[in-house]
Image (cartoon, helix red, strand yellow):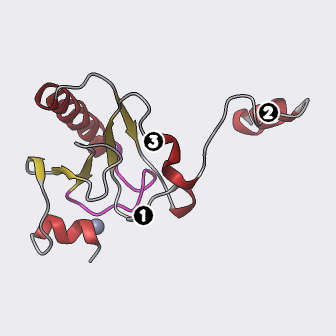
């Protein structure tokens, strides 16, 4: 059983923000910023590819509901919604989840996920973007 399934079953405690029949939201134990919240389906799916479309549709509405709740209750305006698939993308628990990350001036999110991205640092070589578009549209 994965760590998040153990949170759902109650074997591991969590600071719950929201819960209903199908979804659970709780505070990330290593928050990027205070109020950093994870939202998970109660059914175990490893990633975005695995979760059924109807469940994902319902889930994103819960993400919105929880995000709005957090902004009101924690008194912030800006936040990032994030969802990582696989360890190379920074997914540390293989149970599908969204992050809601409150954002503040000069916060540390750029240090997250091991990699910093600087605008203009990495650019496509001539023709490279067109090749990628061809593959996507083929
Ligand atoms: Zn799980």
Q: Quadrant of residue 5?
A: bottom left
Which numbered disc covers residue 109?
A: 3
Classify 10 Å Cα crowding around label 3: few (below 14), some (14-19), many (20 and above). some
Front one among 137 and 20: 20
Classify 10 Å Cα crowding around label 2: few (below 14), some (14-19), many (20 and above). few
The residue that label 2 is drawn on is: 123
Q: Secondary structure at mark 2?
A: loop
The residue that label 1 is drawn on is: 92
Q: Secondary structure at mark 1?
A: loop
Examine the structure image and report whether residue 46 is included in the region drawn in magenta: yes
Classify 10 Å Cα crowding around label 1: few (below 14), some (14-19), many (20 and above). few
Q: Is residue 86 left or right of residue 126?
A: left
CA separation, marks 2 and 1? 28 Å
Mark found first going from the N terminus, 3 or 1 = 1
Residue 40: % across, % down: 25, 52
Secondary structure character of the magenta stretch overall = loop
């Amino acid at each position: 059983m994965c760590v998040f399934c153990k949170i759902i079953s109650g074997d591991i405690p969590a600071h719950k923000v929201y819960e209903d029949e199908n979804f659970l939201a709780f505070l990330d134990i290593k928050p990027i910023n205070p109020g950093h919240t994870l939202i998970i389906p109660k059914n175990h799916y490893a990633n975005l590819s695995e979760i059924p479309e109807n469940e994902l549709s319902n889930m994103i509405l819960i993400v919105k509901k929880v995000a709005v709740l957090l902004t009101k209750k924690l008194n912030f305006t800006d936040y990032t919604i994030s969802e990582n698939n696989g360890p190379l993308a920074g997914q540390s628990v293989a149970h599908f989840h969204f992050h809601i990350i409150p954002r503040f001036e000069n916060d540390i999110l750029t240090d997250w996920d091991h990699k910093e991205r600087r605008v203009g640092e990495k650019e496509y070589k001539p023709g490279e973007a067109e090749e990628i578009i061809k593959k996507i549209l083929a």
